Amino acid sequence: MRKTNQKRSLAVIPCRNEETAIGSVILKTKRFVNDVLVIDDGSTDETKKVAKEAGAVVITHKKNRGKGAAIKTGFKYALDNNYDYVVTIDGDGQHNPLEIPKLLDNVMNNGHDVSIGYRVGNDTEMPMWRRVGKRVLDYTTGMGTGGFITDSQCGFRAFNRKAIEAITPKLKGEAFSVESEQLIHAHGSGLKMANTQVTCKYNGLQTSTKNPASHGFSVLGYVLWVVVERRPLLFVALPGFICVIIGLILGFYTLHE
């Protein structure tokens, strides 16, 4: 039972080996939320130490389990400690903490359950190959969200408690597919989602240690599996129907000839 009626917000920052950027991200983020939680996902550098010195609560995974596992740990912490709102933001500095109020406004004041950072505009330093890969994943994720197209891979988001309670038990993936999985389960739970324009920084940042191609294909494979699991007819009945139509057309053409 809650001891206060005051609305409380928590920033969840999943990270691994981000000792250079994490301190700055925490200090900027603290201005807009009540508390900051860092999930140290098996770092081998001084990430944990720097995060604590910057004023964050730190939960450490002894082994690297993946971003999805880190997000689930953060969500469970938020539920256990009665937070009303959660902001997720990456620890590598690509997101601008000054934009947190925009994300929170959609879930605090505008009737939405999930506010999704949408990376567009001239201030978005996203390489073209990332833009192309992102759009493929956006439209694939859209097949599981009733056609709702958004920035499916942006980790800069805000959630109300209703959304966290609905999504957390359904998250199964432990890697970078977590962003798409969140959206698919949010749609399945009837949550209201909104796009919120944000910027991002890539120049000079090491945003991932994983090969981009293998990263993209692994996310795509898992997203397709989630979509098929939730909407099997989309991948069974629809292709079958198309094949029947093509067969009929070819049959009529053959008879005509």
Image: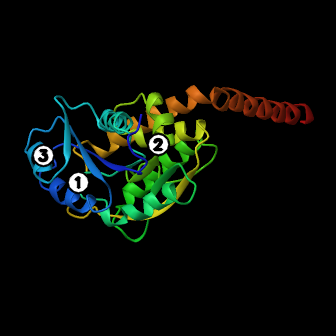
The residue lying at 59 percent from left, 29 percent from top is: 230
Residue 185: give x, y in percent of width and height. Answer: 53, 36
Q: Please say if the residues under marks 3 and 1 sit with CB atoms less than 8 Å apart.
A: no
Q: Earlier in the sequence, mark 1 or mark 2?
A: 1
Question: Pointer 2: what residue?
Answer: 161
Residue 82 percent coordinates (x, y): 38, 39
Q: CA distance from mark 3 to mark 2?
A: 28 Å
Whether 153 is drawn above or below 76: the answer is below
- The answer, for residue 250, to whether it is visible in the render is yes
Q: Residue 47: give its label.
A: 3
Q: Position of residue 229 (x, y in %)?
A: 56, 26
Q: Is residue 249 above or below residue 31?
A: above
Which residue is disc 1 drawn over? 92
Of tags 3 and 2, which is closer to the observer? 2
Above or below, 55 relative to 221 = below
**Which residue of the protein is positioned furthest toward the front in this rendering?**
3
Q: If the image is split into quadrants, where does the N terminus sit?
A: top left
